Amino acid sequence: MHHTPIHVIDFEGTRSSGIVEYGVVTVVGAVIESTATRICAPEGSISDVDQRQHGISEASAAEQQSFTNEWERFAALRQSGPLCAHNAAVEDGLLCSVWSCPRESPNFANTDAPVATWGPWLDTLYLYRRIYPQIDSHKLEDLIRFFGLQPELDRQAERYCPAGRQRFHCALYDALASALLLVRLYSEPELNEISLPWMLLQSAASATDRANFEQQQLFESL
């Protein structure tokens, strides 16, 4: 089990509204070390469909500070450990729409070369698709139910999530769900010693991405 912090992230919002809520769960090994969350002022309109899904109204969010004030937090997170999400392309896209890149940071894939990108990301969606291809659905809520993690998620949500934000499609709740999926991999006997580079490789979205990742690792090791 590795001891590099992994920062599990979830955003609520769209390209139209901007990020209207973030949740971060920092995991070290199999332990939740810290969490952070808040609602953020929208950069555009929040549609009725989105409001029904995440429960954040324009009026309530407008009273908060913009997500752009969180640069130092997210740049520091990226420097200290890899970012993780469930279907990370969504979080990466939203993050890049605010800041195209972070400060130079390690890529955490067994290389000395720093990168100025938010990735490579760990992605619990692709990790579970590759490790458990036989499961019918790899949606976050379905995986939580399938692996019997709902009681633990509810316990963690009661501890960490704000009142009224203890359900799916709330940023910290979803980040906690993804973090629990990540942590439970260490409980599998055959995965107990999985490495961070292996998890980053399995998180690549396509076979082409994985091949490019492996080729880059080989090139940088020469």
Image (cartoon, rainbow, N blue to C red):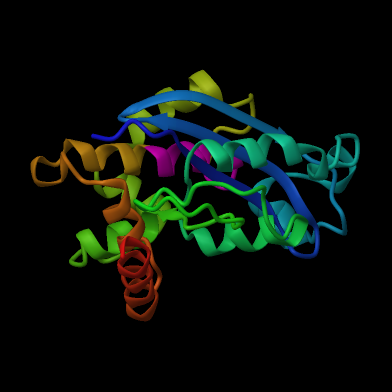
Looking at the picture, how far across and down is residue 219, in whole percent? Answer: 35, 70
Q: What's the residue at 81%, 45% (across, down)?
A: 68
Name the side, left or right, on which 58 lies relative to 142.
right
The answer to whether one can see residue 70 in this image is: yes
The vertical placement of 198 against 218, above or below, is: above
Vertical order, 104 against 88 (above or below): above
Question: Horizontal placement of 193 versus 120: left or right?
Answer: left
Residue lying at 74% horizontally and 51% vertically, measured from the top left: 19
Magenta part of the chain: 168-179
Magenta highlight: main SS? helix
The relative height of residue 76 versus residue 17 in the rendered view (above or below) is above
Q: Residue furthest top?
A: 159
Work out which quarter of the rendered image holds the N terminus and state it.
top left
- Residue 36 percent across, percent down from the top left: 61, 29
Extreme front residue here?
222
Relative to 97, is 141 on the left or the right? left
Query: Residue 71 lies in what quarter of the image?
Result: top right
Q: Is residue 23 left or right of residue 25?
A: right
Estimate the x, y position of residue 215 in percent, counting from the top left: 33, 73
